[in-house]
Amino acid sequence: MSKAKGKAQPAVNKGAGKVAAAIAKVYETIGQGGNIVTQLCKSANAVYKGETIPKRDLKTIADTVARLRNWSPVSAGPRKSEVRKMLRVYDRLPEAIVAYGKKHDNFPWHAAMKLARCLNREP
């Protein structure tokens, strides 16, 4: 038996479902602009309180959002990736949004994704 099989898997945080439901709502209103991303960050922060979200929780949240939004298998892959990218930086993304807003007049969804990707590259 390898070490990986012998270890018990940590349980998914009980609040992961709430985060997934909030993100599903974000996707419902995505056409209104990137400022909706702050709701995603607030929801994640309420549950994880600035701590890194475990990979298992990231997967569970993204899968739950896909199920709640009835995404097709083709579109689910990239969209779940977006969810995970933003959740990885939920604690830093609001500050980046404020900084971006000082230089630009609008804040589309794609700008939020670009900021999340840039923050994910930081050490």
Image: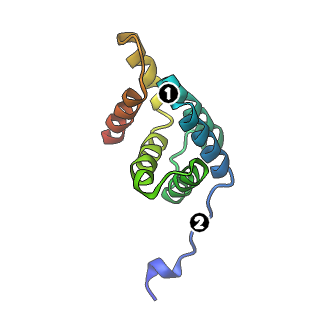
Residue 53: give its label. Answer: none
In the displayed structure, 101 sits above or below 116; it is above
- Of residue 95 and residue 112, the one placed in the foreground of this image is 112
Q: Amino acid at mark 2?
A: Pro
Q: Nearer the viewer, mark 1 or mark 2?
A: 1
Question: Position of 102 compared to 70: left or right?
Answer: left
| Rendered location of residue 81, percent (x, y) | 41, 49
- Which residue does the image show at 61% across and 60% down from the upper left? 12
| Rendered location of residue 98, percent (x, y) | 45, 18
Distance from disc 1 to disc 2, alpha carbons, whole Å, reads: 36 Å
Query: What element does badge 1 sit on?
Result: helix
Residue 31: give its label. Answer: 1
- Which quadrant is home to the C terminus? top left
Query: What element does badge 2 sit on?
Result: loop
| Rendered location of residue 75, percent (x, y) | 42, 50
Can you see residue 123? Answer: no
Can you see residue 45? Answer: yes
Question: Position of 34 compared to 67: left or right?
Answer: left
In the displayed structure, 42 sits above or below 19; it is above
Earlier-in-chain disc, 1 versus 2: 2
Rendering quarter of residue 14 = bottom right
- Which residue does the image show at 60% across and 47% down from the upper left? 20
In the displayed structure, 104 sits above or below 35; it is above
